[in-house]
Amino acid sequence: MYFIIILFISIASCILSLEPAFALSINIDPPSVKLTVKAEQSKSGSITVKNSGSSGIKIKAYTEDWVYAKDGSKIFMKPGSSVYSCSNWIKLDPATFELSPKEEKTVNYVLTVPKTASGGHVSVIFFECPVENKEGISVSGRIGTIVYQDTEGDIKRNGEIKEFAVLASEEGKPVDIKLILLNKGNTYLFANANVKILRDDKTVAGSKMKPLSMLPDDSATASVTIADPLKEGRYKAVVEVSYDGKTLKSESDFSIKKSSQK
Amino acid sequence: MYYIIILFISLAFCTLSLEPAFASQTSGTMTVTVFVQGTFGLMVNSDSFDFASLMPGETGEMFRAEGINVSGASSNGNPWYLKVSTVKPLSSGSDYIPNDNFTWYGSSEGKGTWYGSNEKSLADPYDTAYISIPEEAELADRITNRFKFRLFVPNDTKPGNYTTTVMFTMTE
């Protein structure tokens, strides 16, 4: 009988030890939404928030503005700080609630676009665990659903290649390529870029660049290193930027010098 | 030993008996619809830490030697970003310690970009700690980042119990 008890205790210990204890564990779905809404009209939806932890938690839902940082992350600001904000157009229900362990709840949102709105706007709906009064330094977390809004009938999605540069050196050394894309439209822009290296019209190397994301009047930079060793000679780099069914193309000729190393 | 063998035989029998036996079968079709929920989650393994007692001019490490584990997971295919900030400088009434003196550093299990290999101050409220690679954002794997905090108490700091909240923010 003792053997069975010990066996069960061992198995239970193994199972429990696989799952580390978390003071806070929140899941949301979806992490981003794209809403196309006409001026003076509303669109509603919902976000599922789950407490995956083993303790009950309080959740506060609220909106903030954001703009892109240079590293592609987002800088968050108070609602109404950004000219491309739709934070104050969003109503949340419920805005505060509690979740038992493993419980999930649906938070409903309604986005109402004002009469004078045009172009695109963005916001983030945060779900935060408010801190109870504690001694020392409290630790908290928040997770957000990014909101992208297009005003139907008034969207201009235009990109422009500002710079496409190749920094080539000599045989056997990597080739660095830099792309700067401008958002010349009036809404957010997501673009993908691929680079090909041609010699005598034949592709000898290529690479996919990181996705580029921009708000209007902003630019994004992507860099890529072609690690494939290129021999001495003349080459052409071609970049193709695609977004919203459109393609932009740019070319840059460059030379690889003979290696200076003996 | 006999007890264990009997236990395993019993468990195997119970598992097999969950599948009902049918004497005869007919063919047919059935439409099955499954809604697969995406994963986008943030996990933090502590709700507080402290530096115990520090004298002006002294630098202290957080009292929790193992640091704080902050994990992110996503299955949505888009890179995710983890940021670290404080909601205000360490404050005791109207006195405060500027965030230039409050720093973080640590390590990451992820393959993405980790900014905490060198000590960074919390003076920048928009500091990025980790950027996932797209592959990590498809597999729903939990990527754990370990944060440690260090505090220098300036010489002119008045005695008091200084508090703040360190906030971890995760978005796409």
Image: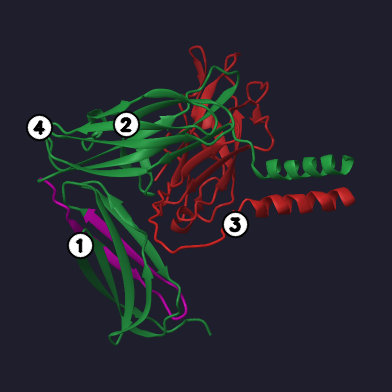
Chain colours: A green, B red
Q: Circle 2: is it few (<14), some (14-19), or many (20+) Cα within 10 Å? A: some
Q: Circle 1: is it few (<14), some (14-19), or many (20+) Cα within 10 Å? A: few
Using the image, name the chain to which the residue with label 4 belongs: A
Using the image, name the chain to which the residue with label 2 belongs: A
- Which part of the image, by quadrant, shows the N terminus of chain A? top right
Marks 2 and 1 in Cβ contact (< 8 Å): no
Q: Describe residue A76's horizontal placement relative to residue A246 as left or right.
A: right
User: Are discs 3 and 4 both within one chain?
Assistant: no
Q: Is residue A160 magenta?
A: yes
Part of the protein shown in magenta: A154-182
Q: Is residue B23 magenta?
A: no
Looking at the rendered structure, the secondary structure element under dot 4 is loop
Q: Which mark is residue B21?
A: 3
Please determine whether, in this image, residue A205 is positioned above or below residue B71.
below
Looking at the rendered structure, the secondary structure element under dot 2 is strand
State the residue position of label 1.
Answer: A245
Looking at the rendered structure, the secondary structure element under dot 1 is loop
Residue type at tag 3: Ala
Q: Could you tell me how far apart the alpha carbons at marks 1 and 4 are, in whole angstroms?
A: 29 Å
Give the residue drawn at x 32%, y 31%.
A108
